[in-house]
Image (spheres, rainbow, N blue to C red):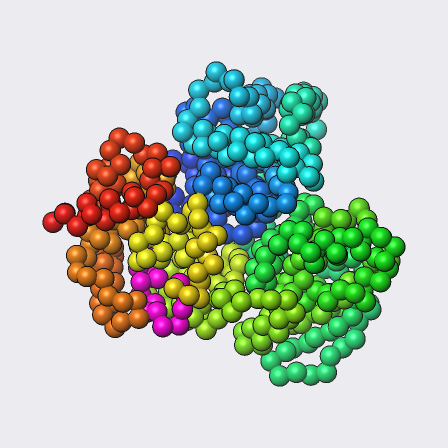
Amino acid sequence: MDMITDGLLAEFSKEFQIEALQEDKRFEYLCGFIVVKRHYSETFDPKDVIVGAGGDLGIDAIGIVVNGILITDKDQLEDMLDGNPDYLDVTFIFVQADRGSNFEAAKLGSFGYGVGEFFNPSTKEPRNPRIIEFVEIMRAIYARSSKFKRGNPACLLYYVTTGKVVGDASLAARSAKVQEELASLEYFSQVEVTLIGAADILKLYTFSKNAISREFAFPSRQDIPEIPGVKEAFVGFIPALHYLPIVCDNDEIVRSVFYDNVRDWQGYNDVNDEIRLTLKSERRKRFVLMNNGITIIARNMTHTGSKFVIEDFQIVNGCQTSHVLFDNKDELDESVLVPLRLIWTQDEEVIEDIIHATNKQTEVTSEQFFAITTFARHLEAFFKNFPEGKRLYYERRSRQYDGLSVEKTRVVPQTSAVRAFAAMFLAEPHNTVRSYKKLSERVGNDIFIHAHKLFPYYTSAYALYLLEFFFRNQKIDSKYKVARFQILLALRLIANKSPTPQLNANAMDKYCEVICEILWDSSKVEALFDKAVKAIDVVAGSNLDRDKIHTTKFTDDLIQHCATLS
């Protein structure tokens, strides 16, 4: 391995706490992460895409992106499908990582064969449990093939080595053959085989760490007079064809740039369908007069003449418009103009005010603003306030820690914070994955509310951080991942037998401190997790079946069992 890649691997291993793993396995983690990150820019744990050894069909990592979301288990997919989306836009990403310095046609052929067998319903090839889980996701997706309205899924293969990509006739021929064989299955709208060498590893790794930046022309604009807290601001319009590259990468919507937009893509409701019909008619020339437009807030910006460069930016209003434009890009021409507000500020209060105001144009409940509330900012500060070894980083804003030298496993996305808290302190682990959408709708009612103490949110997030560490370093068998949130509940019930205080009571801090004193103690924490895992074993028996564990009955039985433990 060359020195540059070796240095990247060392840095990556430290950030994701996988230094104890063998070099070949750490290289798989690195390659899986940077390749999937190319298609899914939000925070995720690389272990969720790693396939595991033996029975892996020659595949080291798999990423399945559905409607802009990285799907890592079937329950997560089912929760999405329960919302009856109008369409399914799917990309399958397969990675083979080889530390060798050469690309080998034979290995590429084996890789392509393995991907084909992944989709083969009658394959006789051995498959490990993680491959089987990914196959279940794949089959559940194809069972809804009527929703492939934008075309069949894409199938992308990445063969990664530490070598140099050069023109090799035999390799090109094998690559073409792999593409031809997979395309002949007629499952995919496109099949691509990409070779990734050492230089590409560096490029993709750098991309994974940097804030998204875009350069574009904005000649049709008007300066806005000086406003306190705002460095510069402009209003004007931009051709839709010039706007789409701001929110797209690799011909995909970059979902993370809409993080602060409190309404995610709603599909083709009445409003969005009307936008689509406008774009398909001669009325599209009036689009600039009929649409409320886009609001971009950039935390860093430079401009020379009409050329603007924005970095660390968010689309805080215009998520729906952006998706409809993307979905109907073939209908666009230079006559379709989009109203644009461009604001350069780093003042959080200004940002919050703008988001509140621009999103009042259609109904948005106050709960949907939770990611930018005072509570979320306090939670972020609370997590950071612990000493280094105990510190976590609540990710209030997408990718805000990507470019910083922090252990990425200590970064807590909002979904993880909500799930861990609901599992551990609301005693609802059965609602954390399959019913997460319903759980998230309770934010502002009994989750993330100002009256709550902050310590239980930290405690549950820290417990989840440790559990994932034990999974990643094989201290807890991966077969228990299906019960990860049930383990968190058992852990709390075992670590502190006292009655659970109200979430707004001062006694809650002391209650959590008792639990954290064990979590922070390296001589006690493994024994605590071992007891929690054994509790799962007792209640589940020999059947760690997802459909059994993710039920209210299993939760009730687990609570009763933990009450009997000394």
Nearest to the observer: residue 51 or residue 18: 51
Q: Can residue 205 be seen?
A: no
**Which region shows up in magenta?**
447-462
Residue 409: image location, x then y, percent: 41, 51
| Residue plotted at (30% across, 58% down) | 425
The x, y position of residue 293, in whole percent, is: 73, 65
Q: Is residue 399 magenta?
A: no
In the displayed structure, does residue 46 sit left or right of residue 421? right
Q: Residue at x 60, y 46 (%)?
A: 85
The answer to if 451 sits in the magenta stretch is yes
Query: What residue do we see at 44% from left, 20% from top?
Result: 126
User: Left or right of 450: which side holds 279?
Assistant: right
Q: Nearer the viewer, residue 112 or 277?
A: 277
- Asked whether residue 365 appears in the rendered view, the answer is yes
* Residue 28: x %, y % from top left: 47, 36
415 or 305, which is in the foreground?
415
Q: Quadrant of residue 387?
A: bottom left
Residue 87 in percent (x, y) is at: 64, 43
